[in-house]
Amino acid sequence: KCRKVAPIPSATVANLWVASATLKANPRKISAGSCNNPAPPPTKAENALAISDIMNNRTWSITGIPDSWYTGHCNVEHSRKLDRPVVTVKQITILSLVLIALNLVMLSSSHAGNTSIKCWKNKQKIRECGQVVPPEYAQQRIEILNDRGIVIKVIQPARTKKQLVEDQRKAKLQAIKDKRKQDDIILLKSFTTERDLLLSRDANLSSIKGIIDISIGNTKSLKTNLGDLQKKAGDYERSGQTVPPSLIKDIDKLQRQIKDMQSFTEKKEQERTAMIKRYDEDLKRYRMLKKVKPR
């Protein structure tokens, strides 16, 4: 029996490659192979010849595929005969025009889908629409519509100076609220009980007080040394002698040290005052968060 080894081709543009485009009534004989050895696709030269035939407004047909391509070494009585319909240039031209029209429709629909309409209000509060917003209305509220007339986006109007000032005020208030919330979280995580907060306060105040006391003691020592040097300088002056430059230099150095130490002490005193105030506020806030009555 005959064994089919390849599908039966039909005369369509999609499978014209399996055959050779030939002049009608003047076919070119090209081997199409057999059941075991099918013919390869046409070469570039054959494709070029087929294009040349079409450009010369000739009709062409599918030829050169023998029956053995389907039947192989089969009995003649079981072989299948191949129909060879003719495809004309007119049919190909119509098909090309249809494809071009479809591409144009797709491009046009794509372009229409990307086109947006903008709407605004003029000086008479009348709604106007178009693809470009006039410059005098560019700072107003703009609505973007799709091709179906549905609002897909709204551009808010530009903020006035008064609105900008109000926005800044609200932003500052919000920042204060956010910081307070963060501080509350840290306060509750840092101290499990009110007693822990009080112990921390007392320890820090005691530490800074110790630094202040040391600074005050150092200042007293420097003042004592300065008094001794000034006395020596006075002795030189009373005796009619010139005060040595080294003594004058030491006196100036001690005066600078005393001044720096006093500034340091004042700074630490301010820190201690701020620390007391901060701990008092933290204690009050802690009691409010924990809903504990003050002792």
Image: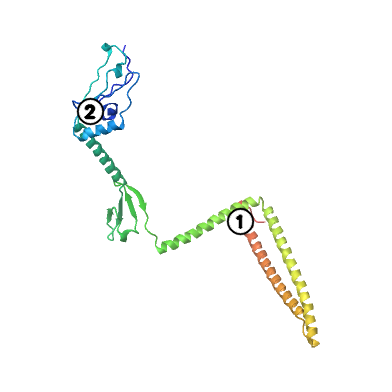
Displayed quadrant of residue 159: bottom left
Q: Position of residue 221 (x, y in %)?
A: 77, 72
Amino acid at pointer 2: Thr
Look at the image and tell me whether residue 171 can be seen: yes
The answer to which of 228 and 279 lies nearer the viewer is 228
The residue drawn where x is 66% and y is 64% is 271
**Label 1 residue SS:** helix
Real-space Cα separation, disc 1 to disc 2, in angstroms: 98 Å
Where the N terminus falls, by quadrant? top left
In the rendered view, does 138 fall on the left or right side of 287? left
Disc 2 target residue: 22
Between marks 1 and 2 in the image, the one whose residue lies nearer the viewer? 2
The residue drawn where x is 33% and y is 54% is 142
**Label 2 residue SS:** strand
Q: Position of residue 239 (x, y in %)?
A: 81, 87
- Give above or below for 138 relative to 267: above
Q: Outermost residue, bottom direction?
A: 240
Q: Position of residue 288 (x, y in %)?
A: 60, 54
Where the C terminus falls, by quadrant? bottom right
Amino acid at pointer 1: Arg
Q: How is the image coloured?
A: rainbow
- Give above or below for 106 relative to 70: below
Disc 1 target residue: 285
The answer to which of 116 and 243 lies nearer the viewer is 243
Q: Position of residue 145 (x, y in %)?
A: 31, 49
The residue drawn where x is 72% and y is 72% is 257
Displayed quadrant of residue 66: top left
